[in-house]
Each structure stands twice: as C-alpha cells, then as structure tokens.
Image (tube, rainbow, N blue to C red):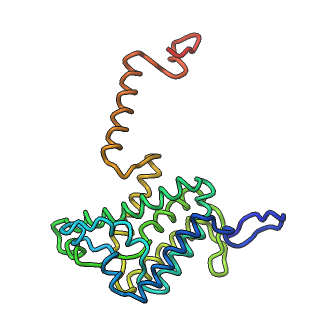
Amino acid sequence: MRRNAPSGSSFSFGPGSMSTAMQVLVGANVALFVFQRIAPPITEWLGLIPGLVIHEFRVWQLVTYMFLHGGLFHILFNMLALWMFGTELERRWGTRFFLKYYFVTGIGAGALTVAFSLLPFGFAQQLQGVNIIGASGAIYALLLAYAIYFPERPILLIVFFVPARICVMILGAIALYSSLGESGGVANATHLGGLLVGYLYLKGGRMTLSPFAEVKYRYVKWRINRLRRKFDVVSGGRANDWDRRVH
C-alpha cells in the first residue's frame, strides 16, 4: 500500500503501526488460533454451527466464530487484510466506530448465515451442520468499506500498483478461494452476509444490533418529517418566498 510518508519521501509501504485496538484484535485471533492447535475441541464449542444456535441457543457462537481459523494461510490472510485495510479505516472513523463496524458486520454475517440455513432448500439447510469459523465476514465488510472510501488509492499488489477497488476485488477472490480449501471452511453465505451488512451499515449511516432500537429510530425520523410537512417547515424557504426565509 502506498502512502505519503511523513519524512517527505514519495511513498511508504503498509498502513503504518497498529493501534492498541488493532493489536488486541490481532492478538486475540492469534491466541485462539494457537489454542485451537492445543485443544481442538474448542473449535466445535466456539465455532458457528447454525443448527446448534437454532436448537440449543448457543448465541455466543455468533461472536466467537470470528476469532477461530481453519489453517495458517487462512489466519495470515485475514490478519494481513485486517491490518492493511482496517488501520486506514480506523484512522478515518475513529476507534469506536471502527470496532462497532467490525463486530456488527461480523456478528451480522453470522446471523444472516443462520437465517439462510433455515431456508427450505437443501443447499441452505446443509449449513446447519457446518462449523463456520474465521473473521472473513468482517474482513469482507472492511474490504468493501475501503473500496468505497479509497477507490483509486494505489496499493502494491505483488509487483504492480493497482487502484484499491481493483485490489480489493482480487484479494476478495483470493480470500474466498483460500477459505474454501480450509478444514472447517467458511460458508459463502457468511462472506456475502458480511458484504451485505457492511453495505447496509454504510449506506444507512447507522445500524444497531437491536431491531427495536432501529424501528424506534425510523419511527422518530418519520414523525419529524411529518411534522415538518404539517407546519410547512422548508429549509431555505420555498421558491416563491421573496426573502427565502425558513417557515
């Protein structure tokens, strides 16, 4: 990734040092990956198995699955993407919004996967017995956000600089390919769920884990717009108002 360097040189590689929040995220993923190698049964307990979430209410799996990985290449790519793209987004958004986006998209991707497994189709229902692991749902959401905010920023890919939007598409395809080959795997529905939740989050400007809070927000917004029309409140006045006042 090419950025203007503080020393005045033309570019530097990588997004820079990791923040404390980024260090904690990466450290937690690495620690649990090592623990998986020591105690393999933890993968079944903390991985996302839609059928167990539905029938045994193991809701913690919607969070914990994000910190487990199926193989070395799987975790290396995810942590590299988290550092490269997450660091830039955290600088732009601030740590609080970044962490909220990361967890909302990761949890949302898992929840959509569980919902997808309930569809009356064989290819969907087979997910109920699959152990889904990996941060890829949240990583896909980060890739999407980066492509939206920095579409033309040059990124060094192997030996060539390419626009961020192209690089993100290539890395996304690599992530999909690598995850399909790992033991345990990551469902395609989870990747797509991360993209969908990330898009809705950014497009709507806000999203909450509580559907009741979201409904309340939409209702209040509707009431405000209704009152504006009722009392003829128009920003900047109407076209036939000679003094362009706000009524």
Quarter-of-image position of residue 161? bottom right
Q: Position of residue 89 (x, y in %)?
A: 58, 59
- Residue at the image point whose x is 57% and y is 15% from the top: 244
Quarter-of-image position of residue 26? bottom right
Q: Position of residue 79 (x, y in %)?
A: 54, 75
Query: Who is closer to the viewer here, 116 or 242?
Result: 116
- Residue at the image point whose x is 55% and y is 61% from the top: 146
- Residue at the image point whose x is 41% and y is 80% from the top: 179
Farthest top residue?
242
Q: Position of residue 100 (x, y in %)?
A: 48, 56
Farthest left residue?
120
Q: Is residue 199 above or below residue 223?
A: below
* Image side of residue 194 versus residue 26, left or right: left
* Image side of residue 93 versus residue 60, left or right: right
Farthest bottom residue?
38
How many labels were placed on the picture?
0
Q: Position of residue 241 (x, y in %)?
A: 53, 12
Q: Is residue 139 above or below residue 240?
A: below
* Image side of residue 61 versus residue 236, left or right: left
Query: Who is closer to the viewer here, 150 or 88?
Result: 88
Q: In which quadrant is the N terminus drawn?
A: bottom right
* Image side of residue 243 versus residue 116, left or right: right
- Residue at the image point whose x is 44% and y is 73% from the top: 67
